[in-house]
Image: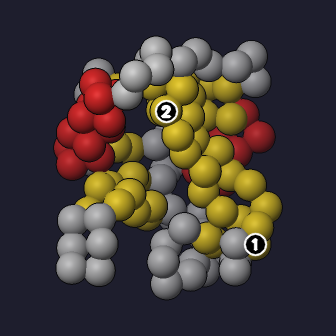
């Protein structure tokens, strides 16, 4: 379904270990919006909701909103450090186009 790179796993483990709130995984979903029609949403979460699929990779539990699964299938999530800024990048084979920041797609 979704692939996390080693860099993304390392960044997520660091974020999970430094949070004051109980956190067991990463929640990922797609919402309408952004400059291309859809935008990626992700954040740390304690437990999955009843409408999420859960999988684990590299010791990270990932909670994927069932309504977003078809849009995210095959997506690779990486964590990139560059001069332009650090952050998560999405390589989504289902996207017909994406904006230059990589946070929105159609």
Q: Is residue 64 left or right of residue 19?
A: right
Q: Is residue 32 left or right of residue 100?
A: right
Relative vertical location of residue 70 with respect to residue 40 in this rendering, above or below: above
Camera-side mark, 1 or 2: 2
Q: Is residue 78 left or right of residue 6?
A: right
Residue at 74 percent across and 16 percent down: it is: 50
Relative vertical location of residue 7 with respect to residue 92 in this rendering, above or below: above
Which residue corresponds to mark 2? 44
* Quadrant of residue 67 within the rendered picture: top right
Observer able to see residue 46: yes
Residue at 47 percent across and 53 percent down: it is: 75
Number of the label disc, if any, that sits on residue 90 = none
Nearest the eye: 32 or 43: 43
Precedes in sequence: disc 1 or disc 2: 1
Label 1: how many Cα within 10 Å (few below 14, some 14–19, many 20+) = some
Nearest the eye: 80 or 5: 80
Label 1, label 2: how far apart the Cα atoms are: 24 Å
* Quadrant of residue 48 within the rendered picture: top right
Q: Residue furthest bottom?
A: 100
What secondary structure is marked by label 1? strand
Which residue corresponds to mark 1? 37
Label 2: how many Cα within 10 Å (few below 14, some 14–19, many 20+) = many
Observer able to see residue 106: no
* Quadrant that contains the C terminus: bottom right
Q: Position of residue 36 (x, y in %)?
A: 70, 78
Residue at 74 percent across and 55 percent down: it is: 31
Relative vertical location of residue 42 with respect to residue 75 in this rendering, above or below: above
Q: Position of residue 76 (x, y in %)?
A: 40, 53
Nearest the eye: 33 or 97: 33
What secondary structure is marked by label 2? strand
């Amino acid at each position: 379904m979704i692939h996390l790179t080693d860099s993304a796993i390392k960044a997520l483990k660091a974020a999970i270990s430094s949070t004051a709130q109980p956190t067991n995984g990463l929640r990922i979903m797609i919402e309408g919006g952004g400059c291309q029609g859809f935008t990626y949403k992700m954040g740390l979460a304690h437990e999955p909701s009843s409408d999420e699929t859960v999988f684990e990779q590299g010791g990270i539990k990932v909670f994927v909103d069932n309504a977003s699964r078809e849009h995210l299938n095959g997506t690779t999530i990486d964590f990139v450090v560059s001069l332009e800024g650090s952050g998560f990048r999405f390589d989504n084979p289902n996207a017909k186009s994406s904006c230059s920041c990589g946070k929105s797609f159609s």
